[in-house]
């Protein structure tokens, strides 16, 4: 499918309200939740960094499934930088981003058992394109991905082809989700960290929250009830 650029429909917000869930699990003094999480009824998936030394080598993050009883099961290992994850509308496909490897993986998924099948490459970006970061899936099954150091959002079709490009006024969009009355507004976070004074002068909105009119709808949240 031929790619097309979206009009500059973003607008900046002066403040961000974030609601979230934090859980402390004893996994050693070096443990920390990595970016990326998600849920389906009955369980949640999260990335966790277990060692600074291993993370520096690019293999120190695992992905865990948290069950309804609070129990944790390691589902993936050897991850470089854990970021966006989400499911297809019918819950049978799981998408997961390893930003260090510039790759979004695709897995068959059993929505009843919460288990993964064999992974395959959904999208791999070249070094010149930036790093895939947060992602979300819309009601048509298309995957929206924020591209760190890419100054854009990309909408990929279910087969991995580029459907749409949304150019952003900041170099480091980080994550995104749908919201608004009909779930058609894409909210996009961005970062200032690591940018030089010149880069910040060129992109003064870095760190802002943006709202993008997409013309498509996201999926309703699928909360997991965890003890």
Image: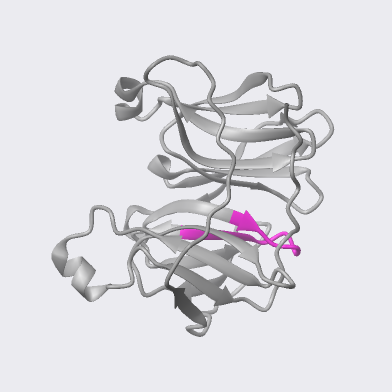
Q: Residue at x 74, y 72 (%)?
A: 182
Judge left or right: residue 208 versus residue 106.
Answer: left
Residue 139 painted magenta: yes
* Magenta residue span: 136-146
Q: Is residue 3 visible?
A: no
Q: Residue at x 45, y 67 (%)?
A: 15
In the rendered image, residue 117, in percent from the top left (x then y), is placed at 71, 31
Judge left or right: residue 202 versus residue 143.
Answer: left
Name the colour scheme.
one colour
Q: Nearer the viewer, residue 220 or 136?
A: 220
Q: Is residue 194 above or below residue 213?
A: above
In the rendered image, residue 143, in percent from the top left (x then y), is placed at 62, 58
In the rendered image, residue 170, in percent from the top left (x then y), is placed at 35, 69
Q: Is residue 224 above or below residue 19?
A: above
- Quadrant of residue 187 in the image? bottom right
Q: Which quadrant, please, contains the N terminus? A: bottom right
Residue 215 painted magenta: no
Count the marks: how many? 0
In the rendered image, residue 9, in percent from the top left (x then y), is placed at 52, 82
Q: Is residue 76 visible?
A: yes
- Quadrant of residue 152 in the image? bottom left
Q: Residue at x 65, y 47 (%)?
A: 86
């Amino acid at each position: 499918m031929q790619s097309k650029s979206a009009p500059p429909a973003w607008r900046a917000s002066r403040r961000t309200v974030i609601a979230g869930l934090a859980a402390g699990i004893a996994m050693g003094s070096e443990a920390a939740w990595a970016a990326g999480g998600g849920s389906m009824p009955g369980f949640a998936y999260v990335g966790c960094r277990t060692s600074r030394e291993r993370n520096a080598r690019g293999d120190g993050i695992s992905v865990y499934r948290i069950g309804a009883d609070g129990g944790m099961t390691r589902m993936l290992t050897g991850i470089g930088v854990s970021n966006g994850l989400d499911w297809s509308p019918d819950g049978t496909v799981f998408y997961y981003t390893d930003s260090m490897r510039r790759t979004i993986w695709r897995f068959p998924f059993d929505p009843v058992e919460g288990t993964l099948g064999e992974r395959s490459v959904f999208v791999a970006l070249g070094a010149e394109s930036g790093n895939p970061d947060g992602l979300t899936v819309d009601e048509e099954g298309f995957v929206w991905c924020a591209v760190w150091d890419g100054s854009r959002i990309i909408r990929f079709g279910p087969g991995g082809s580029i459907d749409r490009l949304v150019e952003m006024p900041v170099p480091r969009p980080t994550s995104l989700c749908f919201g608004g009355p009909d779930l058609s507004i894409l909210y996009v976070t961005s970062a200032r960290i690591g940018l030089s004074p010149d880069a910040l002068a060129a992109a003064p909105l870095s760190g802002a929250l943006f709202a993008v009119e997409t013309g498509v709808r996201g999926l309703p949240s699928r909360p997991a009830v965890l003890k």
